[in-house]
């Protein structure tokens, strides 16, 4: 649980960098990144996609989920 929160915080920051101009500021990006880490973990598991085990795979998975959440939040915001 704590590990996912930390990965989510990193992923939120990374997603904010990837989605330039679509972010909400550092704190909200981190919060959305934490949610995105859970979404990414579920989505990759649901699709049966396995990334490399370990820290890098977890960050990629969480960042993908965070980018997805930021994208959806951007659509809702408009």
Image (cartoon, rainbow, N blue to C red):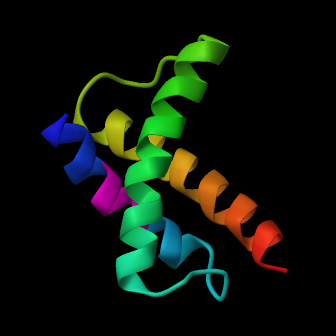
Give, as a single range, the part of the protein colored magenta.
8-13
In which image quadrant can residue 53 be found?
A: top left
Quadrant where the N terminus lies?
top left
**Left or right: 55 in relation to 60:** left
In which image quadrant can residue 76 be found?
A: bottom right
Spot occupied by residue 37 in the image (x, y as percentages of width and height) = 42, 44
| Furthest residue toward left | 2
Identify the main secondary structure in magenta. helix
Residue drawn at (54%, 84%), measured in percent from left and top?
Answer: 24
Spot occupied by residue 56 in the image (x, y as percentages of width and height) = 31, 41
* Residue 12 lies within the magenta run: yes
**Left or right: 54 in relation to 57:** left
Q: Is residue 2 above or below residue 16?
A: above
**Looking at the image, which is closer to me, 76 or 16?**
76
* Residue 2 lies within the magenta run: no
Residue drawn at (49%, 49%), measured in percent from left and top?
Answer: 36
Residue drawn at (66%, 16%), measured in percent from left and top?
Answer: 47
Spot occupied by residue 41 in the image (x, y as percentages of width and height) = 46, 29
Residue 13 visible at all: no
């Amino acid at each position: 649980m704590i590990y996912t929160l930390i990965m989510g915080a990193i992923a939120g920051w990374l997603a904010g960098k990837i989605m330039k101009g679509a972010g909400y500021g550092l704190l909200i990006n981190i919060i959305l990144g934490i949610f995105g880490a859970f979404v990414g973990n579920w989505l990759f598991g649901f699709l049966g996609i396995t990334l490399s085990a370990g820290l890098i795979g977890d960050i990629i998975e969480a960042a993908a989920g965070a980018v997805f959440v930021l994208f959806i939040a951007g659509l809702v915001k408009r």
